[in-house]
Image: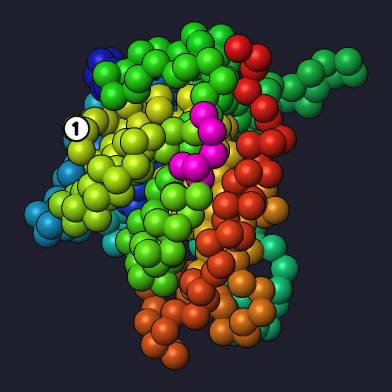
Amino acid sequence: MNSSSEKGGSTTVLVMRLSALGDIAMTVPALYPVCRANPDVRFVMLTQPWPATMMIEAPENLVIETVDVRGDRMGFWAMWRLAGRLHEKYNFTHVADLHSVIRTWAVDLRLRLAGCRVARIDKGHAEKRDRIRGRRHDQLKTTVERYREVLCSVLPPRPLLKEGEQGPDTTFHPLLQEGEGGGQGDGGGLASSPIVPEKAAGERWIAVAPFSQHRGKEYPLKSMEQVIDRLAAIPGVHIFLLGGGKQEKLALRPIAHRLKNATSLAEVKHTLADELQLMARCDVMVSMDSANMHLASLVGLTVVSVWGATHPHCGFMGYGQSNDNAVQRDDLDCRPCGVYGENKCRYGDYRCLDIDPQRIVDRVTEVLAASPPPPK
């Protein structure tokens, strides 16, 4: 995915986000439009190899560089040396640090000493703490908005538009749809993927991603099974179960075996690009506050999201998703108890996830009814 090492262009911006998968996915709605609106600027995105595979349909002036930061071998000085090698290759003028952790600070410092202008993300820690402590209840700035602010702050100023002139398009257009002849719920025209079967006329595909990295964000699997069973009973519906790793594969296997119209993607070796191809053909997804919600957002797939310990107001709702499709308990003063869901429940029972499965089913059926399939 890397371009040649040939230098060129007066402005070259290094963009960094190294983890986690969902956070990297949220860079795409911010980065792609900025790249396209500034064709005279070269952007180099530094991220990890696995998340980099989601960056399909990238703008021509965007280069992807990868580094594996798992473990301890890519510490401060290793990142310092990497920054030097990349600067020799691309001759950076600016740095947009969308991560702002010790590893990226090493790169920031090395390139600042080389004369680059550095901008870092403001993560809004203070206002998020106020939201958790109940001192404010408004919608905070989204992560995508924070990314966009950093990117725009390092770009050279543009001349004022004359009357009648139109500026560059800064809208993010969902992947795998624009110019491909396909669309949400319609498999026509999209590139093929070995993991995506043909979609029958009038068939409705529902993706279900029941897992999350943190217990406070994961709807109990027994309750999710009730959701899956009720959705699978809808005529013409096929369920795709999303998960990864041995434990998730074992958890999804009996559900897929029990239901004739369910497929577990955890059993199939695939890339993130393959997963995006599948999502682009689905009609709706059920997801936690997790990476799958953000991946689905990249292809414009409507997500019915389930929220427990976290809250959409903290700024991590999927890009373009509606809060109307967020299923959550608003009757608990204890939530949100954290921004990322890593905190243990103060009561020990995770009551924030005690949500009637029928609420999720009803929301999904409303989404399906709002966009019926094309006639057979």
Count of residue discs: 1
Q: Would you place residue 325 above or below residue 60 in this image?
A: below
Query: Which part of the image, by quadrant, shows the C terminus?
Result: top right
Residue span colored magenta: 231-236
- Main secondary structure along the magenta-highlighted residues: loop
Q: Residue at x 62, y 76 (%)?
A: 131
Magenta stretch contains residue 343: no
Element type where label 1 sits in the image: loop
Task: Please state the horizontal and vertical placement of residue 96, each as a whole percent of the image.
Answer: 45, 44
Q: Which residue is mark 1?
A: 269
Task: Please state the horizontal and vertical placement of residue 70, each as a whole percent of the image.
Answer: 16, 52
Q: Residue at x 72, y 35 (%)?
A: 370
Q: Residue furthest left?
A: 73
Whether residue 89 sits left or right of residue 224 in the image: it is: left
Q: Nearer the viewer, residue 66 or 54?
A: 54
Image quarter of residue 7: top left
Q: Would you place residue 324 above or below residue 194 in this image?
A: below
Q: Residues within 10 Å of mark 1 (few under 14, many from 20)?
A: few
Q: Nearer the viewer, residue 346 or 37?
A: 346
Q: Residue at x 67, y 27 (%)?
A: 372
